[in-house]
Every structure is written in structure tokens, then in C-alpha cells.
Amino acid sequence: MVFGFLLLVFDPIQRISLNLFGYQAHKNSVDYFNLLVVRILHILGTTYSIKVPDYMPDNAAIIIISNHQSMWDIPPLIWFLRKLHPKFISKIELGRKIPTISYNLKYGGSVLIDRKNPKQATEQIEKIGKYIQQYKRSVVIFPEGTRSRTGIPKPFKRKGLLTLIEHAPEAWILPVSISNSWKLQRYGMFPIPVGTHLILKAHSAIKVAGNDPSELIDHVERLVISEIETIPGDPTN
């Protein structure tokens, strides 16, 4: 109920912020919306362990590569990595009819891809790669393609990653491992289990330049998976 209330309140706040005050005001409204989403999960006893490297590349394009377990991955990524101005590669269905979220995805710098239209998806990924290169911002990509409903990671799909690397050759890659957020959505939106411990670990950034793209993706995939807290084959963990 509180989450739904926040969606309704921040939709007009976003619109006013962007249309009257510009990009930074809009970003601030998005940041604080996601801070509140992180905090309201405390109502159900959710706790967080967040680890971010002491050093983060400054004034650089960054490709944030993360595993994906639930919609609850998004708020901590936005809030705890807010200095990086994270944008998202999201499925096109999320760009309509969801207060606050759809508006941000459409007008906040993210891109929406049609997974049934590979040409359109590739063009949008090329667009966001050029965008982060130009404005020195970051983009979050979930290369599994869809969320893991049991916490067990799925193999990375490479095409989107290779496209991003090609169009943002001066970028850094920030690998991120997320654990236990799947538990929050194991029953959908209701009920949300009590007492979940969500873990987000951002690893040291890796410069794209000077690395073979395929070998780099292999390394990042191993790194991300190595820090996911899960027991293969045990969906109760």
C-alpha cells in the first residue's frame, strides 16, 4: 500500500521537476523516490548489506553489469549508485501505465527495448551506449535477459553487452552481484516475506579499453556469479 502511494505521489513530482526545473531536479526526484522504496521495505523487516568500492571512476561512462532477481533490485541500484546517474535498458512494456516508473524510463535517459524486435533492441542499446559515452553517465544492463525467480543465475546473453562495449569503448564496467532479492518477489507483489536480507556488492571497476570484449564478458560473468549467495538447486536458500 505504501509503495502504491509513493508511485502516485512521485509521478506528478517527476513531471513538474523535469518540465520546470530540468534534468538535475528530475534526477533528484527519482533518487529520493528510490530511497523511500528502499526504506519502506524495512516495514517488513528487510535489511540490506551494501558494498561499493572506495574508488569509482570519475567523469567516465560506466556499464553496470548485474544479475537480476526481482523488481526490488532496482531501487538500491539507483540510490546507492546515484552518483553514477544510472540509466536502464528495460523492456518496452514497462514504459506505459505504471505511475512514476514509466515516466522515468521514457524521459529520464533510459531506453526501452522490444524483445520481439531484435533490430529495434539493438538500435536502442547502441543509442544508450553513445549516450553514456557522451554524457559520462552509467547504464545498468541485466544480461541474463530475465530475472531469476530462484536466485540461481542464468547464463549471460552476450549480444547486448558486446553492442554496449562497441558503442562505449572508453567506458568502465562495474560488476554487481545481488543476492536474496528474489525472495521478496517469490509470491509476486503480495505477500512480501518478512525478514529478507538483501545483499548488493559492487566490485572494482574494469576499464573496457585494452581488453578483448569476449574475454572481458567471461571474466565479469564469473565475478558476478561468484558473489551471489545461493545454493544451486535449492530454491529455499
Image: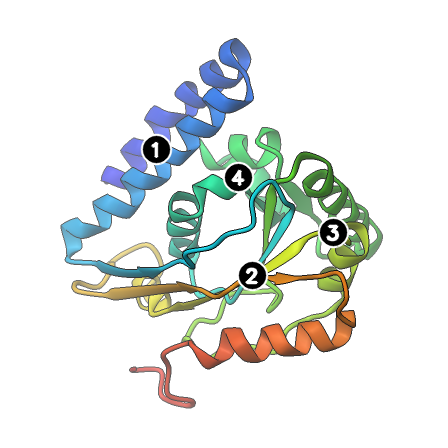
For residue 150, above or below residue 13: below
For the residues bearing labels 3 and 2, Cβ distance under 8 angstroms = no
Residue ranking furthest to the right? 119
Q: Which residue is mark 3?
A: 170
Measure how far apart labels 4 and 1 are at the Cα level.
Answer: 13 Å
Where does the image place residue 87, in percent across and percent down from the top left? 57, 43
Q: Which mark is residue 85?
A: 4
Q: Residue 200 location, x and y as percent?
A: 37, 63
Residue extending farthest bottom: 233
Q: Nearer the viewer, mark 2 or mark 4?
A: 2
- Of the image marks 4 and 1, the number of the one nearer the N terminus: 1
Q: Nearer the viewer, mark 3 or mark 1?
A: 3
Of callouts 2 and 4, the N-terminal one:
4
Q: Residue 100 versus residue 131: which sits nearer the camera?
A: 131
Quadrant occupied by the C terminus: bottom left
Which quarter of the figure has residue 228? bottom left
Q: Which amino acid lies under the numbered mark 2 shown in the image of this protein?
A: Ala
One can see residue 5 in this view = yes
The label nearer to you, 2 versus 1, is 2
Using the image, tell me which numbered label, if any, was put on residue 9. none
Q: Is residue 191 left or right of residue 140?
A: left
- 24 to 46, vertically: above or below: above
Location of residue 220 in the rendering, given as x and y in whole percent from the top left corner: 60, 72
The disc at residue 32 is 1
Colour scheme in use: rainbow
Q: Earlier in the sequence, mark 3 or mark 1?
A: 1
Q: Are marks 4 and 3 in contact (CB under 8 Å)?
A: no
